[in-house]
Image: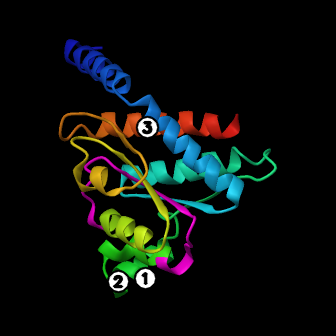
Amino acid sequence: MNELSRKLIEEYFVEGQKILSRISLPEVAALASAIEKVRVSGFTVYIAGNGGSASTASHFATDIGIGSLMRSKPVKAISLCDNSAVMTAISNDIGYSAVIEQQLRLCAEPGDLLIVISASGNSQNLVNAVLAAIDLGMTTYSLTGFDGGKLKEMTQGANVHVESIQGAYGLVEDAHLAICHVVTECVRA
């Protein structure tokens, strides 16, 4: 390994540890509690993001759904990023900024939970989804990075914020996945 690679690796992991140490444990616990409340009442958890955060949304929906199968009432969890036909139809017919919102308007009901994941907190399709979810009587939570953007202030449930420098996508996405994994452990417990 050359010196530059060693330095980059070391700096990345040092910064990652700092970021993880600043995450609010009560906010993470509030998210786990919200999912448990939805599970017990039989409602659905919808999760959405873009790019790497879409991948995290898919991973999280799988983990909390499949991870709770041994419970008497498993978590009904759906990633709104996984149906390419629906996403491209809405994007083509209406516009990408409506791609999550329209799925919620079609399927969601009062009592359901929306979790949006965004490093910037400013993705217009997620902002529109939160507004629609509130209009539909859903509870909304967010996982954000950088300065939190619009989503940090919009969601009525907890915002699990990963304080980081602007543009540190990898570190924020790593932390978001760690948050999703620990929340999954809480759901399984």
Q: Is 69 placed above or below 129 here?
A: above
Which residue in the protein does label 3 denote? 27
Which residue in the protein does label 1 denote? 89
Q: Residue 96, image x and y in percent?
A: 32, 74
Q: Residue 116, image x and y in percent?
A: 41, 55
The residue depicted at 57 percent of the width and 65 percent of the height is: 111
Question: For the image shown, how many numbered marks are present on the structure?
Answer: 3
Tag 3: residue type? Glu
Answer with the quarter of the image where residue 45 lies.
Answer: bottom right
**Magenta residue span:** 105-124
Tag 2: residue type? Asn
Q: Say which mark, if any, is on residue 92.
A: 2
Which badge, 3 or 1, comes first in the chain's sequence? 3
Question: On the picture, is 90 further left or further right than 76?
Answer: left
State yes or no: discs 2 and 1 in contact (Cβ < 8 Å). Answer: yes
Q: Residue 135, image x and y in percent?
A: 41, 74
